[in-house]
Image (cartoon, grey):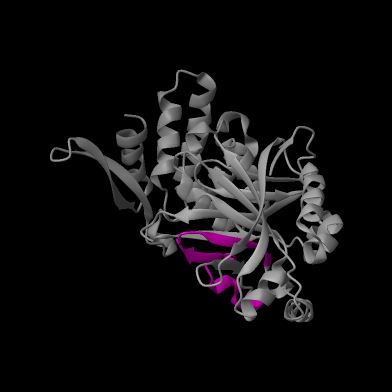
Amino acid sequence: MEIHITHGQDIIKVLYDGFASCLIIRRPVAVNWPDFRGSVGEYYAVSELSEDEKIALADRLNHSLTEGTEAEIMMGIEDFLTLFENGTYQVNLGEIPFENSTFHTIISLPDENAGNRRFSGWFYPFKDFNYLYTLENKSINPERVQYYMELIKKGNRPKPIILNSLYNVDPQMSNAFVLDGHHKIEAYTRLKMDIPAVFITRNNESYSPASELMHEARKILSDVEFEHLFQNNDNSLPHIDFVNDEILTNALDTMLRTSERIDVSIIEVLIRHHQSASPDKRRWLTKRLEFLKENIHLSTLNGKNGLNLYSRQYIKDYKANVWFLKTLINTMELNAWINETILK
């Protein structure tokens, strides 16, 4: 069934800037983005939005999702869709095959281990299609799972709600978020059964503004997570108006002062500001370079190993410029790099 939403409440939506995705349910709930540093996989983090909060949004659907007819479910879904942003949605009933599906959820670690892990979220390999939970494992209530297991054994078929956000220009980065029904999925999984579900699908022809996604992602990600997203988001950073974006500029300044490695994405942002004829962009760049010169990894006297960044060299065999990683250990070397790479 195709449903057109023209007066949506914008409570539920998915942002995607061509690199990362962010699910919004009133506020950021889940963010995922690929790892382009040699691994074939993605990073994934969720907020602390409780199951009760999300169930409240789908409360009108609960009865029909458990015991209702197809017609009752579709009526409830049409009402539920008013919570979404405006657009055209396809709603279908179907099944998630038990054997060929992977559900990704955040596994919480004890607080004492928080400093030993790189991401508070989770890393998972690319698969044909993954379903992303919007709950941490600790939020799954075993008693609720058991309740649904008993219902299923009696012949009921309670259905979770899956939001498919499909990107025609980049199909591999399409996402499937579990909006409601985590406990139902856990029950079917433990019973090793295919999972009947309601699928809400939106086909997207364009990307969301990079700045909007980065602002929302900042609210949910740890500093380390956000830096990884920021430094790897090569295609989207050029579309951010840093001169007029104090929040993202402040985040960049922190990386310039404290990061052990400055990736090509940031270096190219600095180069573009130098190449601009805008006095405001030139002044913005001057301030950023001052922060870069304060990088804590430059001085070996501090027991640091140096600042890792990239230099561009022309390779005859490739007939193109190639970025090479190099390590700078003092301000003198950094000044030379700035003149050769940024201000050239």
Counting from the top left corner in percent of width and height, residue 199 is at: 65, 54
Whether 120 is among the magenta residues is: yes
Question: Residue visible at 54% across and 40% down?
Answer: 17
Q: Which residue is at the front of the view, 285 or 208? A: 208
Query: The N terminus appears in which quarter of the rendering?
Result: top right
Report whether 311 appears left or right of 302: left
> Which residue sits furthest left?
317
Q: Which residue is at the front of the view, 270 or 86? A: 86
Res. 154 image quadrant: bottom right
Query: The C terminus appears in which quarter of the rendering?
Result: top left
Counting from the top left corner in percent of width and height, residue 106 is at: 62, 68
Q: Which residue is at the front of the view, 12 or 114? A: 12
Does residue 258 appear anywhere in the picture?
no
Residue 14 versus residue 239 in the image, above or below: below
Question: Residue visible at 82% across and 57% down?
Answer: 61
Q: In this figure, what is the number of numbered marks?
A: 0
Q: Which residues are magenta?
A: 109-135
Whether 169 is among the magenta residues is: no
Report whether 141 appears left or right of 22: right
Residue 67 versus residue 16 in the image, above or below: below
Question: Residue visible at 86% across and 55% down?
Answer: 60
Question: Residue visible at 31% across and 39% down?
Answer: 336
Counting from the top left corner in percent of width and height, residue 226 is at: 56, 53
Does residue 48 appear anywhere in the picture?
yes
Counting from the top left corner in percent of width and height, residue 82 is at: 79, 42
Report whether 289 appears left or right of 201: left
Residue 32 versus residue 121 in the image, above or below: above
